[in-house]
Image: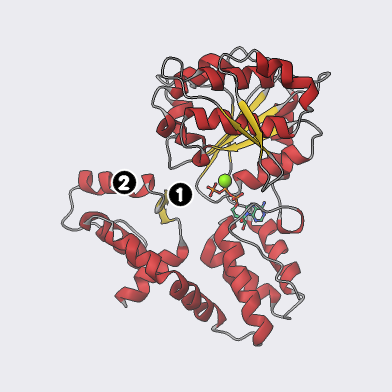
Amino acid sequence: MANPFKFGSVVSEDFFTDREKEFENAKNVLASRNHLVLISPRRYGKTSLINKVTSSLSRPVIYMDLQLATDVSDLATQLLKKFLSINKWESVKHFLANFRIVPTLELNPQTGGMEVSFAPSASNKLAPLEDVLNLIEKTDKKGNRPIVVLDEFQDIVYLDKNLPKQLRAIIQHHKNVNYIFLGSLESMMKAIFESKKSPFYHFGYLMALDKIPYSDFFDYLKNRFDKITNRSETISKEILELTEQHPYYTQQLAFYCFSFLEKERYKKDILPLVIKDIITIHSTDYERLWNTIRKTDKKILISLAMQGKLPTASFPQSTIYSGLARLIAHGYVVKGKNYEFDDPFFKNWIIMKRS
Ligand SMILES: Nc1ncnc2c1ncn2[C@@H]1O[C@H](COP(=O)(O)OP(=O)(O)OP(=O)(O)O)[C@@H](O)[C@H]1O
Ligand SMILES: [Mg+2]
């Protein structure tokens, strides 16, 4: 039997649950002339949701993960390559001839695809990106408006610190394209879209993605565990108790529990066994990570893991809050109702090491 749980990459179809409201909301924004900004903590399902929304529309979609671009010219190159893959060459070639820096196109015999490159220009580094984005805006086919998805948008500042301002200057004139900006909460996303000083301040419809509601996730788990055990209710409850409905960690834990049940029957202490296995798989990562954390921040993590609260004794408040800010920026801690671990297995790794 194929394992019905999936973690780590984009999920769709049978692996995707809930998000109906968010799906409709995003679709409505895209039907309008507005841009969409989607923010959540890491691994809550931003990319999966947007992938589902854009696949449901028969509009041209150009998806770009900014983490994979090395500089501004490379961003232009990759966007153009994606644009060419969904457009007929005959209908766009005259536009390319008018680019300020005319791109070179070559057939890659290995992939069969087209390789694109721009000759470097010291005097106008922005021209290729500007020309590519304007080209996407211009080739709106009979009202079938293009969608440009910029994933991991917070990384824009690493391409060039002036790029946010320059990019806004280009796309604020676009009337046809809907832009979707995705990024994680811990990162610079809030600063980019919520800070009054930022060029992208209030630039689009801001949507926050939360965890998956309990009852939906419970049904999703239970239906799938039904195939392998008659204790599906108990195990689904136990999983959600540990992961608190975090989309990624829930799927991860469910995956390992399912694998376990393929080999053995349900027993009372199945969860600690599976958690131990997951921790063992990741222990070198956790050790490496632990060694990069400052002493005061380690104390905060230990207190959160062991007592479920912030340390009280011997710490000035200001030290604790600056530590928390760092831990949040790294994505180790998230602020929900309380401060909590992002990764329940990292938390359990600390507990295991200290017990
Ligand atoms: N709607 C969903 N239903 C069930 N599981 C989901 C859903 N959305 C996300 N997940 C789980 O979370 C994982 C991460 O999803 P995804 O990569 O879409 O999140 P993300 O927010 O884009 O992550 P990142 O911050 O790394 O970019 C998926 O592999 C899957 O296990
Ligand atoms: Mg993503």
Figure quadrant of the C terminus: bottom left
Closer-to-camera residue (174/254): 174
Which quadrant would residue 300 be assigned to in this image?
bottom left
Q: Position of residue 114 (x, y in %)?
A: 68, 36
Kindly identify the residue that appears in the image at 49 percent across and 19 percent down.
126
Mark 1 and mark 2 lie on one chain; the one further toward the N terminus is 2
Discs 1, 2 touching: Cβ within 8 Å: no
| Vertical placement of residue 34 versus 12, above or below | above
Q: Which mark is residue 73?
A: none
SS at badge 2: helix
Which amino acid, by three-letter code, is at mark 2? Arg
Closer-to-camera residue (297/1): 1
| Vertical placement of residue 323 versus 84, above or below | below
The residue identified by callout 2 is: 326
Q: Position of residue 343 (x, y in %)?
A: 46, 60
Q: Position of residue 163 (x, y in %)?
A: 45, 23
Q: In this figure, which colouring scheme has been used for the structure? A: secondary structure
Tell me: 117 left or right of 292: right
The residue identified by callout 1 is: 337
Which quadrant would residue 27 be assigned to in this image?
top right
